[in-house]
C-alpha cells in the first residue's frame, strides 16, 4: 500500500489549474494550425490567425488564453493500492482549485447556488470525478470548462430503433443549434451508452482525449472521422463567419447500455479546449 498525502494532491491541482488555463495542449494547437492551412476564406483565415496569435501570446507571457477561466473539472484515476492520508480528498482538491485560481489571477466564475446565485469567490467547489483503477498511483487531470460552450451541450435518450442514423443526426443538430455561440472552431465530445448521467460523463471525458488520437474500436474511429467531416461541411466556420473549420476535433467514447435504450450526449467545447494531466 502506497501512501499519498492530500498536500501532494492540493499542490498538483493548484499547478494544473494555472497551467491548463495558460497553455493549450500541443494537439489542440496543431489541430488549429492544420485547419488554418486548409482555410481559403479571408474572414475565416483572419479569425484563425487571431486565435493562433492569442494562444502564442498566452504561452509567451504565461497568461490565461481566455477571460472565462472555467469551472474546474477534476478527474482522478485512483490506484486501488493507494492510501490517501492527511485529510479529506475532496477538501484537498478544492483547496488546490482555490489556490490555483487565486495565485494564477484566474477569474472566479462559480456561484454557490444554481438558482439564488452568489459567487463563492474562489471558484470552488470543483466538479470532482473519481475512478478506482489498478495500481499505486493517482492520475490527476484538470479541465477548466467555460460555459459559453457548456451551455450549448445536449443529451438525448434514444430508443434503440433510432439507430446509428439517429445519433448522426443528433450530433449535427446539436452543432447547428449551437451555431456561433460556443466560439467555433469547436471540439465535440460524444458519449454513447451507459445511463443518462454516464453518457454525459463520457462526453466530458471525450474532450480530455488528445485530438491526434482515435477511438480504439475501428467502427467508432471511422464514425469520428465521418462526423467531423460532416460537421465541417455545415459551414458555420470560425466564430460563425463561415468557412471550412467549424470543428477541429470530434471524439467519441462509449459504454454498454440497457437493451431498451441508447443514450447519447454531445458536450461542446470552444477552441480553447484546456486540460492538463500529472501522475503522482
Image (cartoon, rainbow, N blue to C red):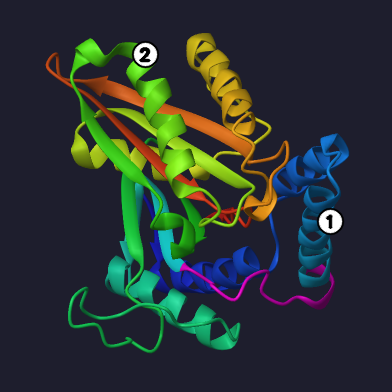
Q: Image point 54% across, 10% down: which residue?
A: 218
| Main SS, magenta residues | loop
Look at the numbered disc 2 and give the secondary structure of its residue. helix
User: Is 69 included in the stretch rendered in magenta?
Assistant: yes
Instruction: Identify the residue position indicated by label 1 in the image.
Output: 46
Residue 183, percent across and down?
Answer: 59, 57
Whether residue 205 is visible to the viewer of this picture, yes or no, is no
Q: Image point 33% across, 43% down: which residue?
A: 154
Name the one closer to the observer, 89 or 116.
Answer: 116
Q: Which residues are magenta?
A: 59-70
Look at the numbered disc 1 and give the secondary structure of its residue. helix
Residue 71, percent across and down?
Answer: 42, 68
Residue 40, by quadrant, is top right
Instruction: Identify the residue position indicated by label 2 in the image.
Output: 164
Q: Residues within 10 Å of mark 1 (few under 14, many from 20)?
A: some
Q: Earlier in the sequence, mark 2 or mark 1?
A: 1
Residue 10, by quadrant, is bottom left
- Please determine whether, in this image, residue 65 is positioned above or below residue 33: below
Mark in the foreground, 2 or 1? 1
Amino acid at each position: 500500500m502506497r501512501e499519498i498525502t492530500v498536500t501532494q494532491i492540493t499542490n498538483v491541482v493548484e499547478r494544473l489549474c494555472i497551467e491548463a488555463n495558460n497553455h493549450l495542449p500541443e494537439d489542440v494547437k496543431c489541430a488549429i494550425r492544420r485547419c488554418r492551412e486548409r482555410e481559403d476564406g479571408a474572414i475565416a483565415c483572419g479569425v484563425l490567425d487571431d486565435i493562433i496569435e492569442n494562444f502564442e501570446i498566452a504561452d509567451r507571457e504565461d497568461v490565461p488564453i481566455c477571460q472565462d477561466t472555467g469551472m474546474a473539472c477534476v478527474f482522478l484515476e485512483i490506484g486501488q493500492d493507494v492510501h490517501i492520508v492527511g485529510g479529506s480528498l475532496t477538501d484537498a482538491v478544492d483547496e488546490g482549485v482555490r489556490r490555483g485560481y487565486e495565485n494564477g489571477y484566474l477569474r472566479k466564475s462559480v456561484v454557490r447556488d444554481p438558482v439564488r446565485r452568489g459567487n463563492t469567490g474562489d471558484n470552488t467547489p470543483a466538479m470532482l470525478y473519481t475512478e478506482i483503477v489498478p495500481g499505486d498511483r493517482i492520475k490527476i487531470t484538470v479541465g477548466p470548462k467555460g460555459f459559453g460552450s457548456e451551455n450549448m451541450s445536449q443529451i438525448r435518450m434514444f430508443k434503440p430503433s433510432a439507430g446509428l442514423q439517429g445519433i448522426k443526426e443528433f450530433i449535427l443538430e446539436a452543432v447547428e443549434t449551437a451555431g456561433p455561440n460556443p466560439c467555433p472552431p469547436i471540439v465535440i465530445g460524444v458519449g454513447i451508452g451507459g445511463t443518462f448521467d454516464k453518457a454525459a460523463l463520457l462526453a466530458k471525458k471525450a474532450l480530455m482525449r488528445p485530438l491526434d488520437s482515435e477511438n480504439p474500436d475501428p467502427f467508432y474511429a471511422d464514425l469520428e472521422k465521418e462526423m467531423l467531416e460532416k460537421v465541417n461541411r455545415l459551414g458555420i466556420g470560425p466564430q460563425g463567419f463561415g468557412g471550412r473549420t467549424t470543428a477541429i476535433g470530434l471524439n467519441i467514447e462509449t459504454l454498454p447500455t440497457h437493451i431498451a435504450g441508447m443514450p447519447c450526449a454531445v458536450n461542446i467545447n470552444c477552441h480553447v479546449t484546456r486540460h492538463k494531466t500529472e501522475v503522482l
